Amino acid sequence: MDKPISTSTHNKLRLERYIRTAIGIVISAFLFWRIYNVVVLQQHFGADTWVRFGLSGLILGGMYALIAIGYTLVYGIMFMINFAHGEVMMLGAFGGYFTFEILRFIPAPTTASPDLNFLNANPFLSVLLAFVVGITISATAGFYLEKIAYRPLRNAPRLILLITAIGASTILQNLAMLLFGPQRKNVVNPDVLDRAAGWVINVGGNDVLISYTGVFSLVLSTLLMIGLFILVQRTKLGRAMRAVAQDKNTAFLMGVDVNDVVSKTFIISGALAGAAGVMWSIHMGLVNHFTGFLPGIKAFTAAVMGGIGNIPGAMLGGILLGVIEAIGPAGMGIDFQLKDVIAFSILVLVLIVRPSGILGEKLSEEKL
Amino acid sequence: MMLHVENLQVYYGAIHALKGVSFHLDKGEVVALIGANGAGKSTVLKTISGLLRPREGSVTFEGQVLEEVPPQDIVRKGVIHVPEGRKIFPRMTVTENLEMGAYIHADRAAINRDMESVFERFPRLKERRNQLGGTLSGGEQQMLAIGRGLMAHPSLLLLDEPSMGLSPLLVEQIFDIIQDINEQGTSILLVEQNAQMALAIADRAYVLETGKIVMQGTGDDLLQDSSVIEAYLGGH
């Protein structure tokens, strides 16, 4: 009785694996053919264009990575996807925008330039303040999000948490629209961080602008990622976070206050998303209540691509997604508007071909 | 009386797991709880360490009532639970697992000293200090679990099935270590299926059957008792 059942299950699993591999091969072949056509045969774009795309991809990828870490940390510790995380980032972006707006109206005249405002008189301090404000707002939002929306549901089925997260996302978005209005706001940077300013390098006879804001974002996101990695690997709080992620009950037996660790995880996730939000303000320059939605979902894609629950995976996934999204449309010779389609096709493909992600391990039964 | 458990009633949903368990443990004792699978031995330990809450009854440790205290604070009172199946953190190194054991302590120098003394007791762990917990053998994991428990400075150590899945030689070794820990002043509440070994080192023991204590006595008395021999020592 037992044997035929197990054999048929086995066959089914094998068939499924073949189908997955087949889909993978077909898609890879198609992509390869497409990219070969565009890049090698048509030579539509010069090297300078590819460098430009690559750079903007890296910069965007750094922001995705910071947001993706938040998804992965929270998933690791609570096994839920915090779909309101993009909105937490949006609040940080507003924090940066409003800090600049306020500082712009504080006069700081000198004898040489009587019209000078605080923003331009102290650009370094202003940017620092913007990050402090943005990060504080997002970290606070993350903390209360968990406390108000998720903590009462700690023992509820995970689907309920997911729906709650989507609800929280809608609430935060609409709240931001009510408070700040629906129109897009131009973020005015200090003059030294003008978005059109930067270093110019020569690639294949053409000039490529490496913007200061872009380099600033990329460097800062790299530093934050290194900082987070040290926090998780080397500090007592990081150890406690990993312990809770690996075995909640045993963490209790070590004397870990699990609720406190969950709160701190949301604070750290929020802080990183807030930093990404302020970078978004400074580098992209446009902010409204919808700012967090797409980056949020893309960062989720990045986290899944890298292997959800895995921190280096989220970093890698974020950077990869940013670069693919930037290079992809040109590389495949399709419309640039379709970059979002590429990002979400990747999500679908990863879920079909390798649901555990690039660096992710197979989900154990315990986690499911 | 160091630990006093009175009329413990614990449920898993509708299942009545402990039906009025009462026992006590004096300072410096080794007390064993023996019994078959599903008798409720682990449930007793989980209720003492706060992972489970009793519906009725009380747990008193050194005069303080424990059943309302959250588990992370029970640890701070010196009641340390080494759970069944070792429950090593699989993706942390041996050193990191031991650091987790000392989570409630802040004195860096003292933690390092404690770690050295754990390594002295378990030289194997020192050899494997940078290896991930999940890659250790069963015996090494048990040593790590006990070592991790010692890092917290227990005044009462709750050990759940420390002999499970180990070879006879290793079981012997583990029980020697348990006795040694006891001689250095730590009281021990031991849950075991290996009744022979448990009764041999226990000052007193209780026999648990389907959520009730059916027999008690000194370790030696129970080792001689015909019904215990019949039920738990393989009979003659």
Image (tube, coloured by chain):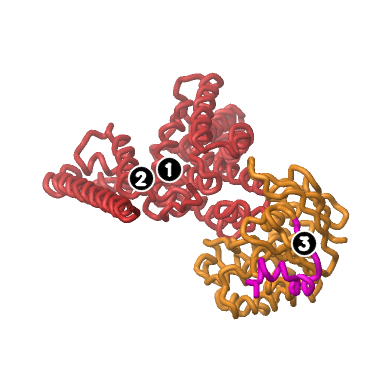
Residue A52: x %, y % from top left: 30, 45
Answer with the quarter of the image where residue B193 lies: bottom right
Q: For this view, does A300 lie left or right of residue B187?
A: left
Residue B198 vs A70, above or below: the answer is below
Amino acid on which disc 1 is placed? Tyr
Q: Is residue A190 visible?
A: no
Verify whether residue B214 appears in magenta: yes
Residue B40: x %, y % from top left: 67, 55
Q: Which chain is red?
A: A
Question: In terms of depth relative to the viewer, which is nearer, A39 or A75?
Answer: A75
Residue A230: x %, y % from top left: 55, 58
Could you tell which of marks 1 and 2 lies nearer the N-terminus?
Answer: 1
Q: Which residue is mark 3?
A: B215
Mark in front: 3 vs 2? 3
Q: Which residue is mark 1?
A: A64
Mark in front: 1 vs 3? 3
- Circle 3/circle 2 CB separation < 8 Å: no
Amino acid on which disc 3 is placed? Met
- Circle 1/circle 2 CB separation < 8 Å: yes
Q: Residue extending furthest left?
A: A41
Q: Chain of mark 1?
A: A
Q: Tag 1's secondary structure?
A: helix
Q: Which residues are magenta?
A: B213-236
Q: Tag 3's secondary structure?
A: strand
Q: Tag 2's secondary structure?
A: helix
Mark 3 to mark 2 CA distance (whole Å): 65 Å
Q: Which chain is orange?
A: B
Q: Is residue A258 visible?
A: yes
Residue B83: x %, y % from top left: 64, 60
Task: State the residue at coordinates (26%, 47%).
Answer: A50
